Amino acid sequence: MPPRIAVIVHGDPTAPRTWSGSPAGIIEGLRACGTEPVPIDATPPGARRVRSVLRRRWTWDSTNPLVATGSGLWADAAVARHRVDGAVQIGSGFRLRTAKPLVTFEDETVAQALRQEPSDLGLLKPREVRRWLERQGRIYRGARVCCVGSAWTGDSVRDDYGINPAKIQVVGFGRNLVTAPVERDWSVPRFLFLGVWWELKRGDAVLAAFARVRERHPDATLDIAGRHPPLDAPGVRGHGLLSLASPEDRARMIELLDHATCMVVPSRREAFGIAYADAGAAGVPCIGTSVGGAPETIGPGGLVVEPGDEEGLVAAMLRLCDPAAARELGERAREHAAQFTWEAVAERILRALALPGTDLTRLAPYVEPRRAVLISA
């Protein structure tokens, strides 16, 4: 009988929108590895409706002590009811007290989120922050292994929470899009911006930089997908918000990647950046942010710039207007992104869980990459 492994998160673990589809990806990967995943929503009955009535932000699930405690109890009961052999806890909005082998999975710690600009946690009260930090530390100390998406996050687990490095395992993230190699025309620069949040991903900076790039390369184009404003600039085409939950929209994203010669998303911050892995797997080099785990995700297959370095962004885009440079980085990106699949992530999680009867002979460790090259003015 295959091992039964609970995948626990606030929200429906099978939904594409929960945690950017990461729980669903882990479930898919665990199933491909021959285990039986058990999705568990840690949200207590009625909590989501109460949050809606009170008009609270998503952080309320993690900062309200009654909801956080109720979430842990609810999830513990589900773990016992489903008789699982081990569990993967995603996020730190609740604390499990199960005796089953448990690993955590994080893209970013609370301590890191507090240091970012802009921060989703900036409106929290000091006591809410303190409770969340303390809970996250207890979760890490009680877990068998702390699985993280990047070495950047692993450093925070070690330094901010005092966790032994031997207990921290970088497992990466998987890709959201399944692409196939295509014959790509590198002779004309075709940039792609793929990001839901326009301001966070610095869409305005991309538009301004592209206008300057087009002075040198008048045939260059820029496709933009996401919550963008009305667009009316030479060479720019808007595609609106594309949802991973829609097969048609996913197909459109793949079509845009097949057409592009460079994806440029220089976010203000990026804990991992699955979109970079999607682009890399398609053989598209990336220009991303130097903040967070993005330099690891992009690796040798692209360039990074500091947020606010407008001249550096223009320089990076001009460099990738060169067909030979773009083609070479695209090949490196495809090779680097090969390790970013949900099956590979699930294999690394299984290694961390080390359950009896699990075949560990085929598991692939995460290979920490050479960081992406930083471009500055």
Image (spheres, rainbow, N blue to C red):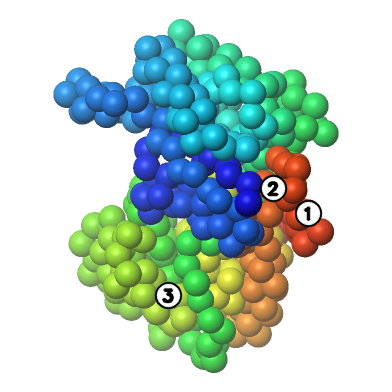
Q: Is residue 309 above or below residue 256?
A: above
Residue at horizontal 41 percent and vertical 12 percent from the top: 65
Q: Give the structural element (helix, strand or loop) at label 2.
A: helix
Q: Quadrant of residue 42?
A: top left
User: Between marks 3 and 2, how big is the CA–CA gap?
Assistant: 30 Å
* Residue 342 seen in the figure: no
- Front-lying residue, 177 or 68: 68
Q: Residue under circle 2?
A: 350
* Residue 258 seen in the figure: yes
Q: Give the structural element (helix, strand or loop) at label 1.
A: loop
Q: Are marks 1 and 2 in contact (CB under 8 Å)?
A: yes
Q: Quadrant of residue 112?
A: top right
Q: Residue under circle 1?
A: 360
Task: Give the percent coordinates (x, y) of residue 193.
Answer: 41, 65
Label placed on residue 157:
none
Residue at the far left: name it: 53
How crowded pointer 1 is (Cα within 10 Å; few <14, some 14-19, many 20+) is rated as: few
Q: Residue under circle 3?
A: 254
Q: Are marks 3 and 1 in contact (CB under 8 Å)?
A: no
**Lower sequence index among marks 1 and 2:** 2
Task: Give the percent coordinates (x, y) of residue 30.
Answer: 59, 54
- Front-lying residue, 263 or 38: 38
Residue at horizontal 63 percent and vertical 82 percent from the top: 327
Q: Quadrant of the C terminus?
A: bottom right
Residue at the far top: name it: 127
